[in-house]
Amino acid sequence: MAGAIGIFDSGVGGLTVLHALRERLPREPTIYLGDTARVPYGTKSPETVIRYSRHNARFLLEKEVKLLVVACNTATAHALPTLQAELPVPVIGVVQPGVEAAAAAAGSGRIGVIGTSGTIASGAYQRALASRAPEARVVARACPLFVPFAEEGWTAGDVPEAVAERYLGDLRGSIDALVLGCTHYPLLRDTIAKVLGPSVALVDSGKAAANAVAARLEADGLLSVQAEPAHRIYVTDVPANFPAVAAKFLGASPPAVEQVDV
């Protein structure tokens, strides 16, 4: 499928980025690779994440993609500069677009960042925000339980709200924008908004990345005009609950899924 947008993630979370891309660019064909056999990346060393990311990128380049999206926050934090230097196509991660959107929403105000323990420990968002909005006050927080909640479809109700209150309740009234720095977290958007209140702008890094992709393709004259573009999903392992989880993340039944070895 030459000329498609390639997307890879360590697992299923990047399907929220794929969903955002398909909404923003409905004429673009896409190829998604989830490295489900080696998930999670957050517990791996930077060197291992870079190696896995190279494997994923090589697989997608063999499909002749025209642009690569690194949908995984951990892979963006550790491998994006390497991929951008080595690959012959544009490579866009999820951190910088999210940071740009947060800076636009909060200005020099107060910005929160939530993510997995690995993403927060990497400091990727904190460094990017310090560079982009040096006057902003930034607080970063790991919210690891949000990932299993999203995958189980347990995104609303007393238990998710109690956990969100425990993680974020003290930020209510003290931040102007919050970056959802994990691809799973958009599924809990309503619960997070309920805890923080309407005055906090929630920034979805996946949607911000989709906007960045659209801008890059337009600038390079690479926008597709296909009326019914094809979409493919590849995984390195097929968990038993993959179709159900993928449907939650995509907002629709996924296309046929093919298992591959990268």
Image: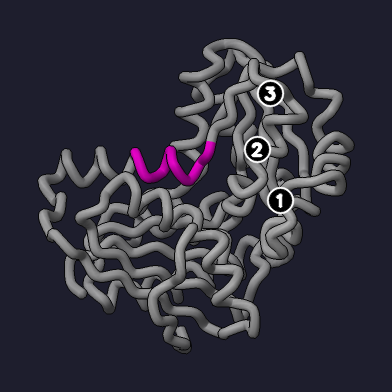
Distance from Cα at disc 2 to Cα at disc 3:
22 Å
Magenta stretch in the rendered image: 204-211
Contact (CB < 8 A) between labels 1 and 3? no
Out of 162 and 95, give the one closest to the viewer. 162
> What residue did someone put label 1 on?
155
Other residues around mark 1 within 10 Å, as few (<14) / some (14–19) / many (≥20): many
Q: Which mark is residue 190?
A: 2
User: Hey, which residue is sitting farthest front in the picture?
Assistant: 157
- Image x and y of residue 85, in percent: 35, 55
Q: Quadrant of the N terminus?
A: bottom left
Of the two numbered discs 1 and 3 on the same chain, state the one appearing first in sequence: 3
The type of colouring in the image is one colour
Relative placement, left or right, of 215 versus 92 is left
Instruction: Please tell me which residue is depicted at 71% across the width and 44% down the height of the picture.
Output: 120
Helix, strand or loop at disc 2? helix
Instruction: Please say whether residue 218 is one of the residues in the magenta stretch.
Output: no
Can residue 79 be seen from the camera position used here? no
Contact (CB < 8 A) between labels 2 and 1? yes
Closer to viewer: mark 1 or mark 3: 1
Helix, strand or loop at disc 1? loop
Relative placement, left or right, of 24 versus 47 is left
Of the two numbered discs 2 and 1 on the same chain, state the one appearing first in sequence: 1
Distance from Cα at disc 2 to Cα at disc 1:
8 Å
The amino acid type found where label 2 is placed reads: Asp
Q: Which mark is residue 138?
A: 3
The amino acid type found where label 3 is placed reads: Val
- Image x and y of residue 48, in percent: 61, 70
Instruction: Please tell me which residue is depicted at 46% across the width and 28% down the height of the picture.
Output: 100
